[in-house]
Amino acid sequence: MKSTMEHVYRRRTEQKTNYKKRLSLLMSGKARVVVRKSNMYVYLQYVVHDTKGDIMKLSVSSKSLKKYGWTANLGNTSACYLTGYLFGKSVQEKKLSKELVFDIGLQKAQKKGRLFASLKGAIDSGLKIEANPDVFPDADRITGKHIKKEELFNKVKANIEKK
């Protein structure tokens, strides 16, 4: 009887990495836009894969929206969109590749949720990321009409444009 031992990766047992999904993202050969969210903030990172490991070229957090005049909650749908928009403008400013792959890791992909609001912001800023338009939140939620912050949203978006 042959005995074979399968190597189980530490990050798989800790449920931090899905290696099958990660490999499919890396096989595209494109850089990744990695989106992570917490209860209060959203973070977008421009990550390039190298043989030595992943290299983060750029990181944008919803905390940076304060510089542009955002005074509302930094983790809501509007803030996520604006963070994605700011991320896209920062990528263009640093002259990095605009063709990216969307990476949400092990987070649950909730249709019309905050993760996809940040993706919509990145796409609207000029990045080329494949996505199904059905997953994006409604325009009223993105602009903040549902929380009566539409004027603030437009002001901050204009400030990001001036950047």
Image (spheres, rainbow, N blue to C red):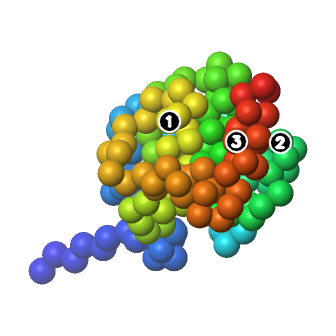
Q: Amino acid at mark 3?
A: Asn
Q: Amino acid at mark 1?
A: Ile
Res. 160 mark: none
Can you tell which of label 1 and label 3 is closer to the viewer? Answer: 3
- Neighbor class of circle 1 (other Cα within 10 Å; few <14, some 14-19, many 20+) is many
Instruction: Look at 43% across and 60% down and name the residue there.
Output: 112
Q: Amino acid at mark 2?
A: Tyr
Q: Is residue 111 visible?
A: yes
Residue on which disc 1 sits:
123
| 77 to the left or right of 60 | left
Mark 1 residue element: helix
Res. 68 mark: 2
Instruction: Look at 51% across and 69% down and name the residue there.
Output: 16
| 26 to the left or right of 163 | left
In x, y percent, where is residue 87? 65, 38
Mark 2 residue element: helix
Question: In this rendering, is residue 156 above or below 96?
Answer: below
CA–CA distance in space, label 1 to label 3: 17 Å
| Most foreground residue, 57 or 14 | 57
Image quadrant of residue 9?
A: bottom left
- Neighbor class of circle 2 (other Cα within 10 Å; few <14, some 14-19, many 20+) is some
The earlier-in-sequence mark between 2 and 3 is: 2
